[in-house]
Each structure stands twice: as C-alpha cells, then as structure tokens.
Amino acid sequence: AQTVTQSQPEMSVQEAETVTLSCTYDTSESDYYLFWYKQPPSRQMILVIRQEAYKQQNATENRFSVNFQKAAKSFSLKISDSQLGDAAMYFCAYRTRSGNTPLVFGKGTRLSVIA
Amino acid sequence: NAGVTQTPKFQVLKTGQSMTLQCAQDMNHNSMYWYRQDPGMGLRLIYYSASEGTTDKGEVPNGYNVSRLNKREFSLRLESAAPSQTSVYFCASSSGLPTDTQYFGPGTRLTVL
C-alpha cells in the first residue's frame, strides 16, 4: 500500500523568508500524481500545487514550487517570500494514475509565519 | 458555481443516535469521496464512489454507510454513533480523469457525546 510521510509536524518561518516542507512517499507504481494541499484555520482544503510523476520539470505556482526527486521518492514544497496568509496546515498527498483511485494523505505540517 | 457543499456544518450527537451527512457537487464530477480528519492523523478515506452507482470502502469504513444518490449527491450515514466517530468530515469530488484534481467541501464538525 502507498504511504505518505511528512516528518515535520510543525515549522515556522519569518515573514518574507523561504521555507521548505518535506514529504516522502512509498509506492511501487511508476506513474502517479503528487499534491500539496493547504488547510487554513477556515478548514477549507485548498490545492496549492500538483506534480505529474512522468514530468521531470518541477511544478511552480507563483511563490510555491516543488523539488520532486522520483528516485528518492521525495516531494518537498518550497514557499518563497512567506506571507502571514501562508500560515496553515499543509498536507502532501499521492494518487496513482490508474483508475479513480483516492488520495493518500500525509499527516500534515503546521506552518507558522512570524511577523 | 458552489463547488462542493456539505450539510450540516456542525452537529452534536449522543452515543447511539443516527444521522446522515449530505454532500453535493455541481461540477458534473464522476467521483466522490468521504474523508475524516482527526488531530495528528491527516485525512483518512472512509468510502468513495468512482462513478454513479458504485461505492467502495476506504481505509476506515467501519461504522459508516454511504449512498450515491445520483451523480451530484453522495451521503454518509452513521447508524449508531460512537464517541470514536467524533471528527471533522470532508466530502470531495473529482472528474475521474487521470489528470484530475480533488475539490473539497467546507467540512462538517461532528461531536459524539
């Protein structure tokens, strides 16, 4: 079974600085998707970024980028120029490409942004 | 375009009571999902429906039943609530295509006394 591990339960960053959240996963599949979701205090789950495993290029969305290392099964999220609104729980998630398979989530990293 | 809606937003039950959580999506998605979120556990899949007329168990299905009423609606029922079912419940939907993204509802906070 696939598993997703987020080894940092909590992180903090100074406003305007850069922070990297770690995620590793375990799978025997070769084709899959990886996601980072943000959950602010409102509880709403918001997609931050998505990476297709067959793409070598790392995904980027404005201040958010990933470092996808397929051989190492690592998928870290980098937040640049951190803002107070970035404070939230961040969840890494995995799903296979085949069929309508659900997401497998990590346990999350709580990010605090210090003004 | 409301996306994924859930009712109710909050609910308190006594042990042994039953209730149904409602979920609806207006994005014409084929697949729908129910997750529960507990502190330090992330989101865990309870049941999902890959398409209208089908349902499958997820990681933690015990104590729950689901109904895919039509393409839009996917309900989650607790027949006899237990304190261990105190949690935040999320419904999600996706198109079912390989490149799809799951979209989440706002969640239901359920407390079982």
Image (cartoon, coloured by chain):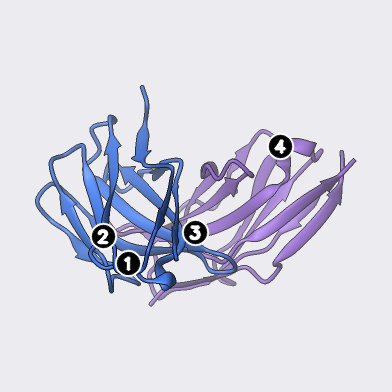
Q: Chain of mark 4?
A: A
Cα distance in 3D space between marks 1 and 2: 6 Å
Q: Mark 2 sits on what residue?
A: B18
The reply to whether callout 1 and callout 4 are in contact (CB within 8 Å) is no
Q: Mark 1 sits on what residue?
A: B81
Q: Chain of mark 1?
A: B
**Category of crowding for the residue at label 3, using alpha-carbon neighbours closer than 10 angstroms: few (below 14), some (14–19), many (at least 20):** many
**Category of crowding for the residue at label 2, using alpha-carbon neighbours closer than 10 angstroms: few (below 14), some (14–19), many (at least 20):** few
Secondary structure under badge 1? loop
Cα distance in 3D space between marks 1 and 3: 29 Å
Image height of A17 relative to A32, above or below? above
The structure residue drawn at horizontal position 25% and vertical position 38%, both measured from the top left corner, is: B29
The reply to whether callout 1 and callout 2 are in contact (CB within 8 Å) is yes
Residue A40 appears in the figure = yes
Disc on res. A93: 3
Q: Mark 4 sits on what residue?
A: A63
Image height of A111 relative to A65, above or below? below
Indicate the position of residue A58 as horizontal and vertical percent values: 60, 48
Cα distance in 3D space between marks 1 and 4: 43 Å
Indicate the position of residue A44 as horizontal and vertical percent values: 52, 42
The structure residue drawn at horizontal position 32% and vertical position 44%, both measured from the top left corner, is: B93
Q: Tell which chain the image draws in purple.
A: A
Which residue occupies the foreground of this view, A106 or A58? A106
The structure residue drawn at horizontal position 23% and vertical position 64%, both measured from the top left corner, is: B79
Q: Are marks 1 and 3 on the same chain?
A: no
Quarter residue A60 falls in: top right
Amino acid, disc 3: Ala
What tint does the image give chain B?
blue
Q: Chain of mark 3?
A: A
